[in-house]
Image: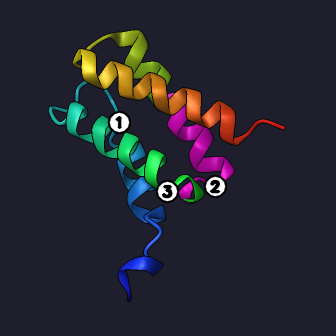
Amino acid sequence: MKPDTWHGTELLRHLTGKLYSTNPYADVVAHTLWALVMLRPSTLDPRTADDLKEAATRVLEEATVSPQSQRELEAIIYALRMIHRG
């Protein structure tokens, strides 16, 4: 597979399932999800987008991640709103 054909859909789904506050790697997961959404918004199908929004919102409400991760999760939620506008 050529690098320009990789879309990241499976990785996005996998990481969305790992985004919870008791995961000791929650900050790494949040950052990786943020990078994927910013670089490859096309990886977001409606179901994955809904799951990601729910997970990001829950982690933000629990306030267990670093300030940088909080900003990145907020950016993900904002991007999801913009992507699915219309």
What residue is drawn where x is 58% and y is 53%?
44
Q: Which residues are magenta?
A: 43-54
Under circle 2, the secondary element is loop
Point out residue 58 in the picture as x, y percentages from the top left corner.
45, 20
Q: Earlier in the sequence, mark 2 or mark 1?
A: 1
Three-letter residue code for mark 3: Arg
Query: How many numbered discs sit on the rendered protein?
Result: 3
Q: Check residue 45 for magenta coloring.
A: yes
Is residue 71 left or right of 80 when viewed as pictured? left
The residue under the point 36% across, 79% down is 3
Would residue 46 be counted in the magenta stretch?
Answer: yes
Q: Is residue 15 visible?
A: yes
Front: mark 3 or 1: 3
> Distance from label 3 to label 2 (Cα)?
12 Å
- Residue 11 lies, in percent from the top left, at 38, 60
Which residue is labeled 1 in the image?
Answer: 19
How crowded pointer 3 is (Cα within 10 Å; few <14, some 14-19, many 20+) is rated as some
Do callouts 3 and 1 mark residues in contact (Cβ within 8 Å)?
Answer: no
